[in-house]
Image (cartoon, grey):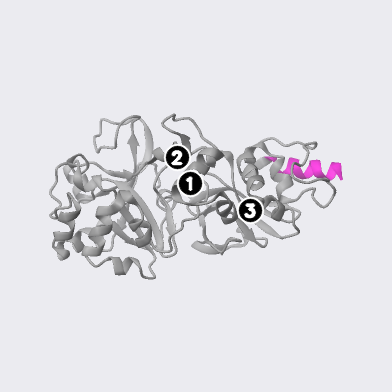
Amino acid sequence: MRKVLCLLLIGAAFWGGSSSCTKKLVNDPVADSIYLGSIPFVMNNNATFSDFYAALQQTGWVDTLYDTGPYTVLLPNNDAYAGYYGNFTQQAGGLADYEAAEVRDGLTLSGSVGYDLLKGRISLRSLPLGMNQEVLSVTGRTHYITRYLDAAGDTLSAVDGQPVISVDNPATNGLIQVVAGAVPYPNPYPTVLQQIQNDTNLTFFAAALQRAHLDTLLKGAGPFTVLAPVNGSFTNAYFSGGYNLGVNMSCLDSVLAADPVKLTNLLKYYILPGRFFLHDFIRQLANPTDTLPLTMLDGNVVKFTMSYYPYGSLPFLSQEMGTGTLQPTFAGNGNLLNGIYLAGIDDEYFFTTNSYNKDGADLTAQNGIVHTIEGALIQ
């Protein structure tokens, strides 16, 4: 049995981290043959997954995964948790920072871990090519699996917009799918409208949707992808280059008094029919700084691109800024023609929890996705 286990763990080494044939089980009183090679055992023998394994232990889900199953785990590696930084330290975080963000969002670690567990042996290789194929977690929440061909003709997978870097890794009681980029995050809101209405950074946009009678639309079946601008996008000329949007959205009173027809024309430029994660846009770029046209609900085009964010600065159209980190941005035709600030993904700072969530992108709901942005889109 020891020889078989060593071979199993060596075979699993390609999906990251080191392995050990002598590592002792933590939660089980007796490490007998029924546990060897099971999902938690394999996971615990790979340091790359220590954060998620610790979460399994804290929540008790580890006992479920020692059962006969079968189960499939959407397993975030430690790099996924590293996106949750300590407050302004710019140092890679971990499970504790992730938990702090959950507290802010009113979620529980148990619900988050349960969201990453699926009943049955769900083989990604057996799924056809296609976007947003639905699978249910053991907690009843929906994941969206996309299978697609890259430029080289290889078949790749993504779950909730995060790349799966290693698929169908076997265990004796199921499969492990290794997710990188970010931890699959259960969203508590069934509609994109509720997601927007419950974000205190989006109060002007939420009020404008109601004034324009688009709230009824965003409660519908959809799906919709909404580029939801934070309040400062409309109140700070820095974000709009002083450009006149045609509607006064400088405060709630102004929004509630605005012409509904003009508001409707403006807000439809922020709504994209369909369900699109950022990864769905990025993977369609032939080159990193290419642009991808997105036809919005009003029929006009918003262009998606990867722009440079110099450290300590905000994204401008300026061609002089050619260094920094490429980050996803959106631009209306007016942004490009007038050299106005591009709309980047909003960074969400959580002062009350002393942690920093990577961004406000890929906020899922049953009828679509919300990407919170900083900046006005100029038609």
* Residue 111 visible within the image: yes
Describe the element under mark 1 as helix, strand or loop.
Answer: helix
Residue 290: say if magenta. no
The image quarter containing residue 22 is: top right
Neighbourhood count class around disc 1 (C-alpha, 10 Å): few under 14, some 14–19, many 20 upward:
few
Q: What residue type is labelled 3?
A: Val
Image-based side of 328 in relation to 232, left or right:
right
First along the sequence among labels 3 and 1 = 3
Q: What residue type is labelled 2?
A: Thr
Looking at the rendering, the stretch of residues picked out in magenta corresponds to 1-13
> How far across and down, in percent of the image, does residue 89 sit?
44, 29
The residue that mark 3 highlights is 73
Give the overall secondary structure of the magenta segment: helix
Which quarter of the image is occupied by the N terminus?
top right
The image quarter containing residue 309 is: top left
> How far across and down, in percent of the image, does residue 44 sit?
70, 42
> How far across and down, in percent of the image, does residue 182 sit?
50, 45
- The relative height of residue 90 versus residue 235 in the rendered view (above or below) is above
Work out whether residue 115 or residue 322 is closer to the camera in this orientation and state it: 115
Residue drawn at the location 22% of the way across and 42% of the way down:
239
The residue that mark 2 highlights is 353
Work out whether residue 372 or residue 333 is closer to the camera in this orientation and state it: 372
Which quarter of the image is occupied by the C terminus?
bottom left
Image-based side of 277 in relation to 346, left or right:
right
Q: Which circle marks residue 282 in the picture? A: none
Residue drawn at the location 30% of the way across and 52% of the way down:
202
Residue drawn at the location 63% of the way across and 53% of the way down:
73
First along the sequence among labels 1 and 2 = 1
First along the sequence among labels 3 and 2 = 3
Could you tell me how many numbered marks the image carries? 3
Query: Are dots 1 and 2 in contact, CB under 8 Å?
Result: yes
